[in-house]
Image: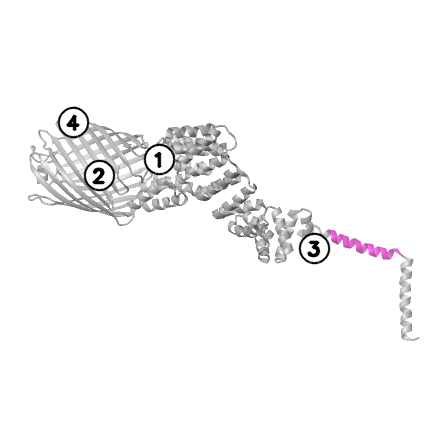
């Protein structure tokens, strides 16, 4: 049989056998098919299981399918877990990137979308919808600069909704694109697609940035859309107040109060004007109390907090420190989580105590919470000025003026700071003193008139030099006249509160017959501990009590030490010790202690003090009939009351002052003698550079024939 015929026959045979087998047992084929189907189904079920994914038994294609199914089913947590893998495996797959961003946004995790959107935008830089999606993610994560650029693409393409345009305007404000932001808000107002509150809030943000022109432009659009709206009027009054346009602020707040007598914003403006502009602190405190006591809902806590803080500040200005601190405590009880309020209360407490180091530290902590807080910056600048830290004061005022260029007090203080820091000072004056004393054993009746001129030159902030020329003409009742001149050169290094040291040398040119004298002093002071001040000094000077002491060239070396504690601005206490050695062999020791109560502070000051002083002297040496020496030791008790009245409307470091001073003291001496003394002075700043002082003093005694009269005039000029 041919081979091909045999092959065909065999094939047919095999097929027949197989066919017969299937016919004979038909379930064999179905069983195999069913078994294969079951295995396939089992594997499929296993493929869509998150458990199998987490077990690591799925391939990438299966994971992608599972991720898409989870996203479609709204199982975003599962989808997020899957896309975390897929975006790594398929970093340039646009479909996966878009699905992943949608998933992350649904999970409220915009941070994860940023790198994905960056890739998508690079692939489609002009796709407006994609740019807007990315912009919102960037905005939500605080990346405002990038958000602004992305918003611009979508908004300029005209595909942005009003909600998105509103978001864009907010970002423009944050990025200081004030003109563009205002234009967008105006657009929304014209279409009536923005809430009034949102537009008014934008006005306040513009005002906070001192963009008053744009704020007023937006206000005009708001008033056009919402005529007579109270919130718009409040914002308008607020801006007028910030611009120091007090008549306009007063006018608008009055208009608001006519419509709504309990309007908290208008009451607040009225109170602030009373304290800031009118200096009518009683009215201001009454208005703040009205806000505090109102039981309105809504903005109650907001206005109440401001009222508490402003009230406490006014009480501090009035030197009512205890009441001010109690007001801060009340505010903190109302809002114990308010970090700014707590920081302010702490700073003010140290400021009221006069504790420089602790106060500076506390104010810096306050500014860490509220970096642009005007009250904190101004107070800190004032403290730096008190310590003669001119550079720090100037930098602080610059920081304040950068945010609030209309702050008049800061501008004035900055000008004075600049003068103090870098300008030489010329001081010239004249004085006249007449002493009349009729002691049987002591001749101290004399008079003198003097003229002096000094130049203080700042080499740097902490170091200055002094040059002074002095001419005095003495007329001794029993010893003729003396005309003497002196020239003084000195230097001062000041870095308070840590330390100050000054020293000077004086050459005294005396008339013929009296040898010239070399005198001078060195003095140091420091605040080694908070509120504890120490002063130490050595001074050599001529004794000019009478003609004899001058002709005999008697000099006095004095060593002095003093400790002062200023626990609070309301009082201070001090003690001192002076040892004096005279060139003729006499010695003296004076010990004293005093306490002062500051009863009134502010534009009117009143102080009451008491001093105990013990004078101790060595045995008398020299001729009895013309001695300058006191015959014996004694103790005095001195009570003093002094005051100062400012003609200014306000008082702070840096303002030009005009004030009068008055003082009266009574010293109770041995043998029933009482020494009375009255003193008065007038200080006037003619400008930042020029000031004058006039002083007069008169002293008299009850049991001895003693009196002195002093007149003094001085001119000080910065050039």
Contact (CB < 8 A) between labels 2 and 1? no
Mark 2 vs mark 4: in front: 4
The residue that disc 4 covers is: 701
SS at circle 2: strand
The residue that disc 1 covers is: 353
Q: Nearer the viewer, residue 713 or 107?
A: 713
Left or right of residue 506: residue 687 = right
User: In the rendered image, which quarter is residue 288 located in?
Assistant: top left
SS at circle 3: helix
The residue that disc 2 covers is: 560
Few, some or many C-alpha atoms within 10 Å of disc 1 (few <14, some 14-19, many ≥20)? Answer: some
SS at circle 1: helix
User: In the rendered image, which quarter is residue 499 located in?
Assistant: top left
Mark 2 vs mark 1: in front: 1
Q: Which residues make up the magenta segment? A: 26-45
The percent position of residue 587, horizontal first and vertical second, equals: 15, 37
SS at circle 4: strand
Few, some or many C-alpha atoms within 10 Å of disc 4 (few <14, some 14-19, many ≥20)? Answer: some
The residue that disc 3 covers is: 62
Contact (CB < 8 A) between labels 2 and 4? no
Mark 3–mark 2 distance (CA, rounded to whole Å): 94 Å
Mark 3 vs mark 2: in front: 3
Mark 2–mark 4 distance (CA, rounded to whole Å): 28 Å
User: In the rendered image, which quarter is residue 348 located in?
Assistant: top left
């Amino acid at each position: 049989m041919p081979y091909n015929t045999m092959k065909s026959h065999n094939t047919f045979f095999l097929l027949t056998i197989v066919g017969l087998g299937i016919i004979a047992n038909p379930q064999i084929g179905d069983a195999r098919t069913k078994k294969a189907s079951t295995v396939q189904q089992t594997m499929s079920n296993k493929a869509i299981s998150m458990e199998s994914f987490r077990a690591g038994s799925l391939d990438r294609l299966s994971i992608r399918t599972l991720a898409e199914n989870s996203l479609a089913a709204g199982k975003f947590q599962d989808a997020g877990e899957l896309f975390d893998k897929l975006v790594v495996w398929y970093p340039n797959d646009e479909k996966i990137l878009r699905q992943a961003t949608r998933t992350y946004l649904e999970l409220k995790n915009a941070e994860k979308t940023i790198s994905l959107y960056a890739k998508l935008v690079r692939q489609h830089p002009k796709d407006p919808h994609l740019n807007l999606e990315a912009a919102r993610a960037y905005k939500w994560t605080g990346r405002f600069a990038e958000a602004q650029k992305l918003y611009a693409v979508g908004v300029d393409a005209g595909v942005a909704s009003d909600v998105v345009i509103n978001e864009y305007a907010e970002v423009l404000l944050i990025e200081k694109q004030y003109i563009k932001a205002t234009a967008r808000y105006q657009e929304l107002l014209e279409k009536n697609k923005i809430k009034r509150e949102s537009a008014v809030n934008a006005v306040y943000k513009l005002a906070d940035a001192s963009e008053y022109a744009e704020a007023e432009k937006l206000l005009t659009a708001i008033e056009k859309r919402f005529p007579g709206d109270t919130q718009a009027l409040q914002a308008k009054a607020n801006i007028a107040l910030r611009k120091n346009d007090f008549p306009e602020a007063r006018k608008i707040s009055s208009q608001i109060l006519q419509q709504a007598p309990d309007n908290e914003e208008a009451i607040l403006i009225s109170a602030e004007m009373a304290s800031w502009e009118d200096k009518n602190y009683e009215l201001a405190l009454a208005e703040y109390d009205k806000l505090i006591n109102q039981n309105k809902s809504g903005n109650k806590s907001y206005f109440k907090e401001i009222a508490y803080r402003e009230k406490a500040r006014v009480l501090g200005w009035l030197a009512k420190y205890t009441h001010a601190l109690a007001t801060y405590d009340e505010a903190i009880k109302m809002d114990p989580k308010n970090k700014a309020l707590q920081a302010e209360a702490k700073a003010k407490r140290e400021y009221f105590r006069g504790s420089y180091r602790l106060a500076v530290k506390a104010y810096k902590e306050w500014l860490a919470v509220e970096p642009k807080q005007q009250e904190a910056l101004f107070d800190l600048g004032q403290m730096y000025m008190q310590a003669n830290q001119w550079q720090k004061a100037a930098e602080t005022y610059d920081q304040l003026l950068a945010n609030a260029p209309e702050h008049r007090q800061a501008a004035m203080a900055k000008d004075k700071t600049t003068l103090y820091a870098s300008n030489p000072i010329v001081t010239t004056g004249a004085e006249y003193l007449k002493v009349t004393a009729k002691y049987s054993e002591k001749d101290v009746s004399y008079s003198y008139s003097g003229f002096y001129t000094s130049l203080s030159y700042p080499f740097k902030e902490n170091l200055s030099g002094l040059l002074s020329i002095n001419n005095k003409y003495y007329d001794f009742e029993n010893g003729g006249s003396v005309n003497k001149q002196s020239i003084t050169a000195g230097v001062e290094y000041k870095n308070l509160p840590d330390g100050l040291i000054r020293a000077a040398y004086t050459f005294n040119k005396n008339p013929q017959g009296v040898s010239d004298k070399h005198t001078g002093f060195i003095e140091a002071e420091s605040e080694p501990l908070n509120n504890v001040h120490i002063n130490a000094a050595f001074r050599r000077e001529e004794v000019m009590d009478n003609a004899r002491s001058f002709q005999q060239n008697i000099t006095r070396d004095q060593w002095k030490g003093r400790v002062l504690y200023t626990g609070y601005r309301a009082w201070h206490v001090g003690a001192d010790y002076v040892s004096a050695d005279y060139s003729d062999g006499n010695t003296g020791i004076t010990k004293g202690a005093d306490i002062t109560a500051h009863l009134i502070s502010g534009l009117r000051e009143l102080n009451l003090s008491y001093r105990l002083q013990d004078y101790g002297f060595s045995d008398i040496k020299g001729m009895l009939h013309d001695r300058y020496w006191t015959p014996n030791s004694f103790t005095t008790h001195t009570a003093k009351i002094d005051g100062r009245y400012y003609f200014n409307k306000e008082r702070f470091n840096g303002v030009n002052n005009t004030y009068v001073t008055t003082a009266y003291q009574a010293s109770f001496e041995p043998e029933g003698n009482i020494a009375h003394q009255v003193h008065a002075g007038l200080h006037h700043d003619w400008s930042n550079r020029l000031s004058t002082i006039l002083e007069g003093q008169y002293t008299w005694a009850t049991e001895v024939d003693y009196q002195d009269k002093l007149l003094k005039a001085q001119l000080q000029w910065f050039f």
